[in-house]
Image: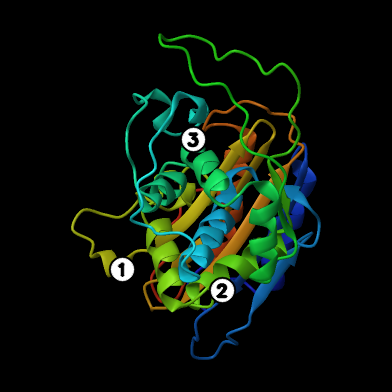
Amino acid sequence: MGVGSEPFHSLEAVLARLDSNCTGRLGAAARLVTPRRGRCQAEEVHWHDEDPFRTASTVKVAIFAAVLAQVALGRLDLGRRVPLSAADQAGGSGVLSVMQPGLDPTVGDLCTLMVVISDNTATNMLIDLLGGVDPVNRVVRGLGFDDITLHRKLPYPPPPLVAGVRPPLTKDPGSFATATPAALLRLVSAVRAGKVVDEGSSDLIFSTLGHQQYHSGVPRAFLGLAEPGQAPDEWPAVASKTGSVPGCRAEVGVVSLPDGSEFAYAVMADDLADTTMSTLSEGEELLGRVGAAMLRHWWPGPRPVPLRPGWP
């Protein structure tokens, strides 16, 4: 074990403590996905990982996989251009909602925007290209992920032309998607292993996750703490997809460690009393503490675990 590591059961003890202290409920699943001398490759942790949670935008990884499944069958082309119309534009995260209609992104561009900046307009456009919600679910189930379910497109109205409060929805649209942490862990583990659609498709998903720009969840206690001049291969790297809606935070990804080993994870927090969308919210800190606990457990020796003091 690395310096600062503890017996494996203590990782579950940290999850139990965080779950009992939060205002909602916590689910997590993680596993070491690459061999390490003296450790079992399948070492893993489960915490309420068979319970369904709202996915928020983490389901976009499954939508990406569904797109690539159709590309592999010749039914879609990543280079096909899809004109943006005003009717496509959805608010929330992303940038297409504030671009002028007539922009001509490719299907591949839409996938990149959906993951890297979690663009909701790009997501809805891809759902439409796949034929709608039900066809997306059929493809995802055909890939072997029965416990990941898309319920609807994203309903948010586009933002106002000047700064202001986003108009409220006329009714509660219900959950965007639901999944279990176990299912999301299987998805990201299969992506890393090259087993989602095919090796090339999996590599494209994983490399895109590596460009994802939101790091205020699971890696909040360790990304950005590297000392000046420290080589990149001496620091953990994260490829992930985050999700945020009021009262819910979720994240799925892979952390690469300096010894070449990696662990995959899916962490979901739901029914939280804090419904703010701030990066300082309860959900963001909760995921950060889970991430710190996982890094502390799997960090290779002999150097100290690079964590913000007091975490987890």
The amino acid marked with disc number 3 is: Thr
Q: How many marks?
A: 3
Rendering quarter of residue 169: top right
* For discs 2 and 1, the disc positioned in front in the rendered view: 2
Q: Which color scheme does this rendered protein use?
A: rainbow
Marks 1 and 3, the one that precedes in the sequence:
3
**Residue that label 1 marks:** 234
Position of residue 26 relative to residue 76, above or below, is above
The amino acid marked with disc number 2 is: Ala
Q: Do the residues under discs 1 and 3 have CB atoms within 8 angstroms?
A: no
Q: Do the residues under discs 3 and 2 have CB atoms within 8 angstroms?
A: no
Is 230 on the left or on the right of 167, as rendered?
left
**Residue that label 2 marks:** 190
> Which residue shows up at 66% across the image and 55% down it?
135
Marks 3 and 2, the one that precedes in the sequence:
3
* For discs 3 and 2, the disc positioned in front in the rendered view: 3
* Circle 3: element type: helix
Q: Position of residue 293 (x, y in %)?
A: 59, 59
The amino acid marked with disc number 1 is: Glu
Q: Can residue 18 be seen in this snapshot? A: no
Quote the CA–CA distance across marks 1 and 3.
Answer: 37 Å
